[in-house]
Amino acid sequence: MPEIAEVETVRKTLKKQILHKRIKEVQILYPKIIESDIKKFSKILKGNQFIDIQRRGKWLIFELENHYLLSHLRMEGKFFLKNKKDSIEKHEHILFTFADNTDLRYHDTRKFGRMNLIEKDKLETTKAIQKQGYEPGEKELTATYLLKKFQNKNVAIKTLLLDQTIISGLGNIYANEVLFAAKINPFKKGADITKKEAEEIIKSANKIIKRAIELGGTTIKSYTSSLGVTGRFQQELMVHKRANEACKICHTPIQNEKINGRSTYFCPTCQKVNL
DNA sequence: AGTGCGACCCGAACGC
DNA sequence: TGCGTTCGGGTCGCAC
């Protein structure tokens, strides 16, 4: 399940391997992945080359000569480097073949990921990119900024952390972990978050994302064959997927409840409701 | 406008 | 054992 840390690792890894190689062939095996004009997709990519790879939130931004290829991995999307002659596996949906007969293959078990090819000058006006909030680690992500976004919000803070227009890059796992680290009850309404709590959220998010990126960097060894993106960060999870297990701090059983349809894990003792 | 929820997918985990 | 059912994950778009 690639979250921002995994996306960043993919960006760095691919950047070392695919830049400036001429694309000679594009195969689209599952067209629904592509949101932009399907006919233009192959046409524009053929003969083109990737000249840089950037990232905004969980979006990968592949820079081409006159276009950007936006790619969102959602839950299960992965990129693999293979040889053109390797047989096509079950969940490989989009294949880019380079002039040297290597392939960049997009693999997605759940078929949830999306790609979007846009003209270069459209990047800033593309909704998905434009609406991203500040990321953990960016200096613009301040308590004042958060408080303003949380103002008058009668919604659980857990839900607000998942809102990419406020903080860009937190998924369900990290939202659970951030709230545990900040000792805030996930049901607490946005409007009731104090400045001190907002500061804790930022501090925790920065720390957790930084750590996850570090671990992501060391676990994804090979992008050529291995599917093993297990991520060592899993071992550091304090609450996520730990329902009924003892809290690592106070030994209270971790609770699992749904907030806005999303599985939410928290320690009822460490994250007491205090309004 | 703000909010909630179903749809999109399918492998894994669960229930019988 | 084998079947059917439920769940989860991020985002969009629709309904209220």
Image (cartoon, coloured by chain):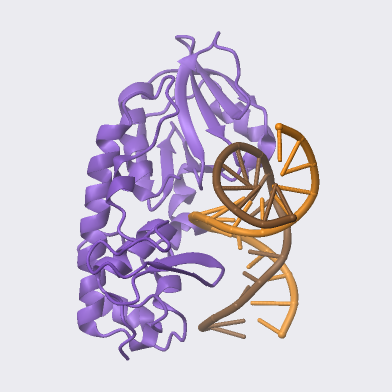
Chain colours: A purple, B brown, C orange
How many marks do you count on the picture? 0
User: On the picture, is A197 further left or further right than A127?
Assistant: left
Residue situated in front as seen by the camera: A177 or A75: A177
Q: In this rendering, does residue A160 appear at all?
A: yes
Check the image and report above or below for A70 versus A81.
below
User: On the picture, is A139 further left or further right than A72?
Assistant: left
The percent position of residue B9, horizontal first and vertical second, equals 68, 43
Say which quadrant the N terminus of chain A sits in: top left
User: On the picture, is A228 further left or further right than A221?
Assistant: right
Residue depicted at 44% across the width and 32% down the height: A64
Residue depicted at 51% across the width and 59% down the height: A127
The percent position of residue A228, horizontal first and vertical second, equals 41, 30
Say which quadrant the C terminus of chain A sits in: bottom left
The percent position of residue A249, horizontal first and vertical second, equals 22, 65
Residue situated in front as seen by the camera: A143 or A91: A91
The percent position of residue B11, horizontal first and vertical second, equals 60, 37
Residue depicted at 34% across the width and 85% down the height: A273
Q: In this rendering, does residue A142 appear at all?
A: no
The residue most toward the bottom is A275
Residue depicted at 25% across the width and 41% down the height: A215
Check the image and report above or below for A32 versus A3.
above
Check the image and report above or below for A133 versus A83.
below
In the picture, residue A200 is in which quadrant?
bottom left
Residue situated in front as seen by the camera: A101 or B8: B8
